[in-house]
Amino acid sequence: MQFHHHGYVSGDPRIEAAAGSGIDRPDTLPEHVDVLIVGGGPAGMIAAAQLAQFPNITTRIVDRRPGRLEIGQADGIQARSVETFQAFGFAGRITEEAYRISEMAFWAPDPERPANIARSSVALDDDGGRISEFPHLIVNQARVLDYFAEFAKNSPARLEPDYGLQFLGLDIDHGEEYPITVTLQHVAGEQEGQQRTVKARYVVGCDGAHSGVRKAIGRKHLGKVANHAWGVMDVLAETDFPDIRTKCAIQSASGGSILLIPREGGHLFRMYVDLGEVAEDDNRQIRKTTLEATVAKANQILHPYTLEVKDCAWYTVYEVGHRVTDKFDDVPTEEEGTRMPRVFIAGDACHTHSAKAGQGMNVSMQDGFNIAWKLGHVLTGIAPEALLATYSSERQEVAQNLIDFDREWSSLMAKPAEEFEDPQELADFYVKTAEFPAGFMTEYRESMITGNTAHQSLATGFPVGKRFKSAPVMRVCDGNPVHLGHHATADGRWRVYAFADSARPGEDSRLAAWAGWLLNSPDSPVVKYTPASGDLDSLFDVKAIYQQPHGEVEHGPTIPDIFMPKVGPFQLTDYEKVYAINPEADIFEARGIDRQGAVIVVRPDQYVSLVLPLDAMEELAAFFDKAMGMA
């Protein structure tokens, strides 16, 4: 964490100085905003948190709830999400309070006594951190929203949700400066029942599965309900079931299935209890299943073990549905290329599925992260409006892949035990597909912000289009072992990692020539696109990673200036952009980096955009000319 570069900070360094729209921010919703976010769930709150880092943009987020979410809804936090939390500064704190999943137990009918269940196997969740250095967590969605809200409030824009406002509709007049007129209604507080309108440049609908924003732009959910119901309960209970504090998939001979999720705090746990197939003429009667009936069903499945519920914090019944919206913005397919989108939908507003793979909150947050930095760049003039068209194309494919995966996983969870040819089928599927639910199979296609794979062989561990997978390095200035990717905060900047050739600082090298070009050439993206009023690293955060151990890399005048930029009003040197290998875990070997060096370009939302050799200056310039709309 870096601070003091704008002067001595004696208080909480996470509270940044107010700027732009954050100075004297009005308590009431203004008549005109740049971005209106509808819905304060995971997609909406991460979008608000990211846009709060752009104080010259007026962003507001409205939510129909009278205040913060308190209980219920999602609880699974995949490792990719914890990586994202690191960028927003709260990965460590939320990990401390969460339940950490280290293994999953599988229970099936006892071959000796089929009426009873017995543990059939135990699978490690992420053996040795192979998938990520971050853990798989369980914590109430409300706490995730709290942390994003804290980040947004402490950011320069001082963004806070406007609660008690329900979306009623919108109209778009493309000839106006603020083309979207949004109608809202107060549903809580002194103004309850009153309507008001807000004019916006852009709207992001994060208002759930029954999204009013989705309906207002004529988008359709495609898919169907799977006619299978589950009772979900967060309970405090007494039980003799031995794995009550372990994540479990439990299948009985005749009583259905349970997915058991231990919750944070050491006592609470969630059960997804199989309520069976739903008749086509049920007319939602299954949703009237009582808590008592669900507890009785759970006891039937758990036999010979028993469950006595002492208190229920939250209970609901849902039917599995798999739906993806036909498009994630307001531009009809036949009009693509003729105009740019103004309204976007994210999260459950554009994809719904079962809760048992722990994907809803996680994928939704990546939706919000994706659209927010793009809106930030467009509204500040960094990038052209064409950037916004990449949101739907990127995230719709991710959503479809999620639906396909979840359909298979939820079908396996609902499958009667006697229909499995191999009792290990469910456990094998869980282990084999672990990287997908962890959030690491997203791979964006080539576009104006994602390059081709012509030079992928130079860095096989950083696949273009996939998230930047961090690795240990040594920070040269202080000799501290750190993770390279953990220094990348959600500040809207591009990251450029320059992996050196074998030369040391001060010696003629490819890295030195590249660094000189990046700092001085009129073709350099740093020279062309860094705002005149900004620091040298205000748009491009450029770092060097040398092949030698840190004791052999001297931090001084031999380091190229691009890696030691002057920052802040006092123009102080930033010493934390120069790294060396950690001899115990050489990043060049761990990530397949060519010893002749390589350049890795990473988007503001942590996905790899490009891999290049150090001497491919023209290709680097051409990529950013395209990304910035100059090509």
Image (spheres, helix red, strand yellow):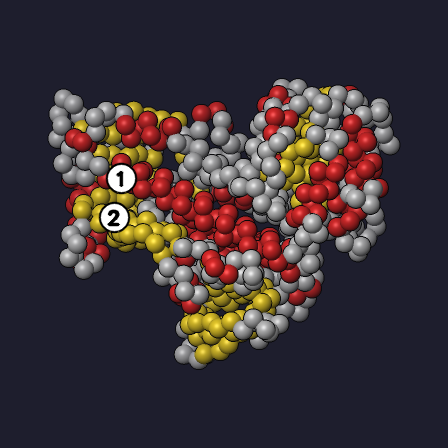
Point out the residue furthest to the right here: 557
Q: Residues within 10 Å of mark 1 (few under 14, many from 20)?
A: few
In percent of width and height, residue 318 lies at 27, 52
**x and y percentages locating residue 203 in the rendered image:** 52, 64
Q: Quadrant of residue 221?
A: bottom left
Residue 540 falls in image quadrant: top right
Q: Which of the image's four quarters has the N terminus? A: top right
* Residue 184 x, y percent position in the rendering: 46, 73
User: Residue at coordinates 25% horizontally, 30% vertically from top-left?
Assistant: 107
Q: Residue 411 has which mark?
A: 1
**Amino acid at dot 1:** Ser
Q: Residue 248, how many percent across, how many down?
A: 30, 34
**Numbered circle sitting on residue 425:** none
Q: Could you tell me which secondary element the residue under label 2 belongs to?
A: strand
The residue located at (17%, 54%) in the rendering is 280
In the rendered image, is residue 339 in sight? yes
Nearest the eye: 609 or 589 = 609
**Which element type, helix, strand or loop, lies under badge 1?**
helix
Question: Mark 1 touching mark 2, by CB under 8 A?
Answer: yes
Task: Count neighbours of disc 2 (C-alpha within 10 A) and say few if under 14, some if 14 to 19, many if 20 or more.
Answer: some
22 vs 394, left or right, is right
- Give the answer, above or below, for where 177 lies relative to 358: below
Q: Which mark is residue 226?
A: 2
Res. 143 in view: no
Q: Residue at x 56, y 62 (%)?
A: 339
Q: Is residue 95 left or right of residue 103?
A: right
Left or right position of 591 against 350: right
- Look at label 2 and name its amino acid: Ala
**Rendered residue at 44%/55% (across/down):** 327
> Which label's residue is closer to the chain start, 1 or 2?
2
Query: CA separation, marks 1 and 2?
Result: 9 Å
